[in-house]
Image (spheres, rainbow, N blue to C red):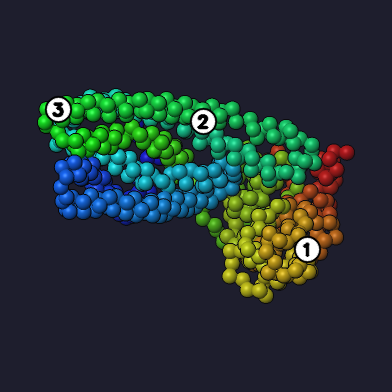
């Protein structure tokens, strides 16, 4: 039965020529493997007759060498094919996740699980399919070889074929649901675990470690059930296959024995018959590969789910020289019918109680979040700084210049504007200090993130609580430095501090996803509800 990810797997195999090399190598090795029992039989008969035929020995050695060399080449090719396919899938999936933007419909941990585990599983599709195909060809070839020895041997063997086919079909059907469930629950556990790791300090401060542990581990019973289901199916198949294979070998051996008694077969032919019987039942012994195939298809389905998710509507940016305008914008349950115009060069502060939609509005203004309805008119040259910036790059300097071709002078100027230069030059290696070795506080990390936004020289700078960890004095210094470093630029700041709002040219007051009011801080301060945003209602 076709599954959602099967087309993706087909594309993965088709895009690379190396699977054809692996298939060619497998064909040569399989041919050698099919000829080997007959060659061994000839050598045994030669030994029993007391004669020596050099050609027989050479032929046997050549076939053995072909099989050994083929296995070695196959291992190298299989590793290369799997690595390349996995990398291709990860690139496609990563690009799609980035295209879907923020907020993503897929939880961070689940996305990581798909990029790492599922792409790794799906990347092995070519090797898995070729392995199963080679085994199937070997089985058919073994039946033909048995028929060439004696049609009675092939007839005895073929009696077991329907039972072997039934076992394979049943195994795949029973395994499919458990494999898919295991993959999905693994992604859910990864998502919960990543959330918890990101908020370790908050969890510890709140004293809810036990409760959070229970939340993360809550899906484990379902994971265990899916895993146990796979192992039960595997175990059932293995013991059935373990009984079927020797039973077939005994039946073929018995038929071969009668052939020897009647003079139709030699002693060497009996040995060859046993070898072909084992090769013929090889597909039943490939239960592990069949499970891998189902896991690969399930993983491909999870990847295809992301690739098939439509990207949110993102109209092309309309250059406006720093002016930002929202017209009847709606974003899920976070923003409702927002109409807002921020003139060029304005310092705007977004305020509101928790859950009012401040960060969502900032993401829309910064172009990080698509809208479900309405229109956003704004400049495409936007710099963005976060409350908890993810700093990428090997060193602090490269983290500030990440994604740009900035030189050392530009990096240093951005750090000065963000009021973090004095901190960085005191580090053991200055700007060349590895990020992992830099003992930085939360506020210093925020300022590095701010420097990263400044270095892009944006027309619009959006700060989503990006100075929340700074004291009021340092924040005021940063504000003045930004005015100097980015003169005439539009700045949008999400804040919970009245002092920051007081410095703003325009305050946007959000309440339950709607703009409750706009104006200066002094104008809005006369409203008791506005004051409650900063005082907590006291």
In the rendered structure, are the residues bearing label 3 and label 2 in contact, judged by CB atoms less than 8 Å apart? no
Task: Indicate left or right for 341 with 185 as reference.
Answer: right
Residue at left offset 56%, top offset 46%: 112
Is label 1 or label 3 in front? 3
Task: Indicate left or right for 247 with 420 as reference.
Answer: left
Is label 1 or label 2 in front? 2
Task: Indicate left or right for 410 with 181 as reference.
Answer: right
Decide: is 394 above or below 386: below
Residue 513 rendering spot, x and y as whole percentages: 68, 40
| Disc nearer the start of the sequence (1/3) | 3
Residue closest to the far front: 50
Decide: is 459 above or below 168: below
Residue at left offset 55%, top offset 31%: 223
Q: Quadrant of the C terminus?
A: top right
Q: What residue did someone put label 3 on?
A: 261
Secondary structure of residue under mark 1 = helix
Q: What residue did someone put label 1 on?
A: 478
Residue at left offset 75%, top offset 68%: 428
Q: Quadrant of the N terminus?
A: top left
Counting other residues with Cα less than 10 Å from the Cα at mark 2, is it few (<14), some (14-19), or many (20 or more)?
some
Front residue (pair 335, 103) = 103
Front residue (pair 151, 381) = 151
Cα–Cα gap, marks 1 and 2: 54 Å
Q: What residue did someone put label 2 on?
A: 227
């Amino acid at each position: 039965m076709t599954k959602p990810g099967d087309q993706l797997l087909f594309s993965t195999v088709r895009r690379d020529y190396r699977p054809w090399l692996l298939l060619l190598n497998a064909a040569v090795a399989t041919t050698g493997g099919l000829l080997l029992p007959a060659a061994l039989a000839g050598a045994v008969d030669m030994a029993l007759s007391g004669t020596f035929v050099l050609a027989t020995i050479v032929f046997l050695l050549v076939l053995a060498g072909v099989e050994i060399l083929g296995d070695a080449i196959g291992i190298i090719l299989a590793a290369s094919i799997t690595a390349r396919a996995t990398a291709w899938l990860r690139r496609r999936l990563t690009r799609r996740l980035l295209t879907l933007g923020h907020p993503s419909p897929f939880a961070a941990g689940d996305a990581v699980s798909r990029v790492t585990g599922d792409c790794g599983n799906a990347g092995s599709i070519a090797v898995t399919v070729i392995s199963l195909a080679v085994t199937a060809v070997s089985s058919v070839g073994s039946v033909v070889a048995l028929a060439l020895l004696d049609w009675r041997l092939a007839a005895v063997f073929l009696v077991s074929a329907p039972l072997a086919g039934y076992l394979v079909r049943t195994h795949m059907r029973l395994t499919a649901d458990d494999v898919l469930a295991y993959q999905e629950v693994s992604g859910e556990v990864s998502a919960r675990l990543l959330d918890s790791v990101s908020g370790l300090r908050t969890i510890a401060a709140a004293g809810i470690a036990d409760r959070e542990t229970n939340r993360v581990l809550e899906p484990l019973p379902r994971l265990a059930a899916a895993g146990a289901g796979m192992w039960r199916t595997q175990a059932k198949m293995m013991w059935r296959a373990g009984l079927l294979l020797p039973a077939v070998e005994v039946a073929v051996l018995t038929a071969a024995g009668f052939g020897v008694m009647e003079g139709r077969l030699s002693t060497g032919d009996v040995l060859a018959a046993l070898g072909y019987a084992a090769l013929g039942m090889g597909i039943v012994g490939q239960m592990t590969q069949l499970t891998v195939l189902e896991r690969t298809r399930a993983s491909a389905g999870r990847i295809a789910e992301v690739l098939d998710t439509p990207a949110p509507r993102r109209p092309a940016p309309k250059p406006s020289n720093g002016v930002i305008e929202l017209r009847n914008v709606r974003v899920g349950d976070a923003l409702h019918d927002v109409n807002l115009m921020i003139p060029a060069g304005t310092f705007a502060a977004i305020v509101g109680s928790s859950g009012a939609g401040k960060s969502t509005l900032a993401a829309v203004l910064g172009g990080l979040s698509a809208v479900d309805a309405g229109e956003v008119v704004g400049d495409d040259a936007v710099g963005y700084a976060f409350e908890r910036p993810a700093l990428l790059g090997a060193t602090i300097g490269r983290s500030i210049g990440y994604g740009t071709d900035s030189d050392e002078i530009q990096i240093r100027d951005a750090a000065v504007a963000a009021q973090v230069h004095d901190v960085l030059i005191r580090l053991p290696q200055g700007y060349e200090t590895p990020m992992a070795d830099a003992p930085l506080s939360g506020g210093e990390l925020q300022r590095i993130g701010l420097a990263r936004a400044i270095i892009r020289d944006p027309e619009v700078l959006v700060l989503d609580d990006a100075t929340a960890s700074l004291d009021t004095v340092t924040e005021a210094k940063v504000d003045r430095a930004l005015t100097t470093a980015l003169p005439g630029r539009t700045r949008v700041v999400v804040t919970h501090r009245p002092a920051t709002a007081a410095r703003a040219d325009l305050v946007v007051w959000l309440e339950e996803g709607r703009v409750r009011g706009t104006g200066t801080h002094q104008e809005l301060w006369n409203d008791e509800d506005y004051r409650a945003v900063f005082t907590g209602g006291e």
